Image (spheres, grey):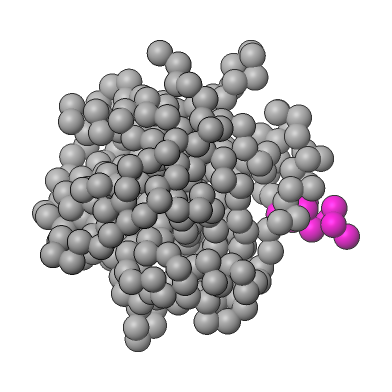
């Protein structure tokens, strides 16, 4: 029974990567952590979070974005064993806002990451509108290990901080490239035929490189062997990236296409081509304490 459930957990894209790396059996074992229900411990975790990352494809444009939502802890909460509610919506200028406020039954992926405890929780499902905001019918619920999460011990909410007008471009500016290279964390939104997913990528500053105004490269560090994100990219190369400044609240959202690459030594990396960039100064009201880098982070090459 467990084997049958594990097979249903993965689509052909994830299976292709697992087979290439030689971890199919291990992935079947790890995949048992994925469930449909929101357990009490997961519900309690969600209610403590001031930040939720949501990934989806805009039905109007087909572009995939990763968007941040913030609020007083409790703004995200479980309202049943298979549903979470979100009070409010993203900023009116966020590129995903039209899709989130106009579309029902939209496939979405979410991740709540708590830097204070190095814990993260992912809930994927279908989004619908409610009178108070949004609700997600959960189809996949699971936690990941603390690997590559930078610890930030505390945060404060800056009450008078408001999003500035976003800057939209079709390639990276020099300052945006520097912002990316200095980042220790970003969030990745991917999609497949039946859903969407949002995940976390972390490392020491420099682990993501802007090789040109239109291209990024980052290593795919060893993880849980499920290859959900890479599998999605094999099946559908559309992707959205979110970088954020944990002090100023500035966000940089990128949409484009990503391609996993494998070398003869078994190393993996992802090459991302930018289609559009949206930079929003002071987008988030949260100011976090300085990071303590994860001991799992490899030293970036170059």
The residue lying at 14 percent from left, 46 percent from top is 167
Residue 26 colored magenta?
A: no
Which quadrant would the C terminus be assigned to in this image?
A: top left
Of residues 143 and 157, which is closer to you in this image?
Answer: 157
Q: Is residue 184 above or below residue 55?
A: above
27 relative to 213 in the view: left or right = right
Quarter occupied by the N terminus: bottom right
The residue located at (31%, 28%) in the rendering is 181
Q: Is residue 61 visible?
A: no
Predominant secondary structure in magenta? helix
Give the total number of marks visible in the rendering. 0
Can you name the residue that lies furthest to the front here? Answer: 153
Q: Determine which quarter of the picture holds residue 193.
A: bottom right
Which residue corresponds to the image point at 45% horizontal and 45% vertical from the top-left? 151
Q: Provide residue 113's location: percent of width, then percent of height.
A: 47, 54
Q: Is residue 154 visible?
A: yes
Q: Is residue 73 above or below residue 261?
A: below
- Residue 156 figure quarter: bottom left
In percent of width and height, residue 79 lies at 52, 82
- Magenta span of residues: 1-9
In the displayed structure, 81 sits above or below 289; it is below
* In-image side of 280 versus 126 (left or right): left
In the image, what residue occupies the spot 11% across and 54% down?
Answer: 165
Whole-percent x, y for residue 262 in the image: 59, 22
Q: Where is residue 98, by image quadrant?
A: bottom left
Considering every residue shown, the one lying at the far right of the view is 1
In the rendering, at what x and y percent does residue 101 appear? 32, 72
Find out whether residue 6 is within the magenta segment.
yes
């Amino acid at each position: 029974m467990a084997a049958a459930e594990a097979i249903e957990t993965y689509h052909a894209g994830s299976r292709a990567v697992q087979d290439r790396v030689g971890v199919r059996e291990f992935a079947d074992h790890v995949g048992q952590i994925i469930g449909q229900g929101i357990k009490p411990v997961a519900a309690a975790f969600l209610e403590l979070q001031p930040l939720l990352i949501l990934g989806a494809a805009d039905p109007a444009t087909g572009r995939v974005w990763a968007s941040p939502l913030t609020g007083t802890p409790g703004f995200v909460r479980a309202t049943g064993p298979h549903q979470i509610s979100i009070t409010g919506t993203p900023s009116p200028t966020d590129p995903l806002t039209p899709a989130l406020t106009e579309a029902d039954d939209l496939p979405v992926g979410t991740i709540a990451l708590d830097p204070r405890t190095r814990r993260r929780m992912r809930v994927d499902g279908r989004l619908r509108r409610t009178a108070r905001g949004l609700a997600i019918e959960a189809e996949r619920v699971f936690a990941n290990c603390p690997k590559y999460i930078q610890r930030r011990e505390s945060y404060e909410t800056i009450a008078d901080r408001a999003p500035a007008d976003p800057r939209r471009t079709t390639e990276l500016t020099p300052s945006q490239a520097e912002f990316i290279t200095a980042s220790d964390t970003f969030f990745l939104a991917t999609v497949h035929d039946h859903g969407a997913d949002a995940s976390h990528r972390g490392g020491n500053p420099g682990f993501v490189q802007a090789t040109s105004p239109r291209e990024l490269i980052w290593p795919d560090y060893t993880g849980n062997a499920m290859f959900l994100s890479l599998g999605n990219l094999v099946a559908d190369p559309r992707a959205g990236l979110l970088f954020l400044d944990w002090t100023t609240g500035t966000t940089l959202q990128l949409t484009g296409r990503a391609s996993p690459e494998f070398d003869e030594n078994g190393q993996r990396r992802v090459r991302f081509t930018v289609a559009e960039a949206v930079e929003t100064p002071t987008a988030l009201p949260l100011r976090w304490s300085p990071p303590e880098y994860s001991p799992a982070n490899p030293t970036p090459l170059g």
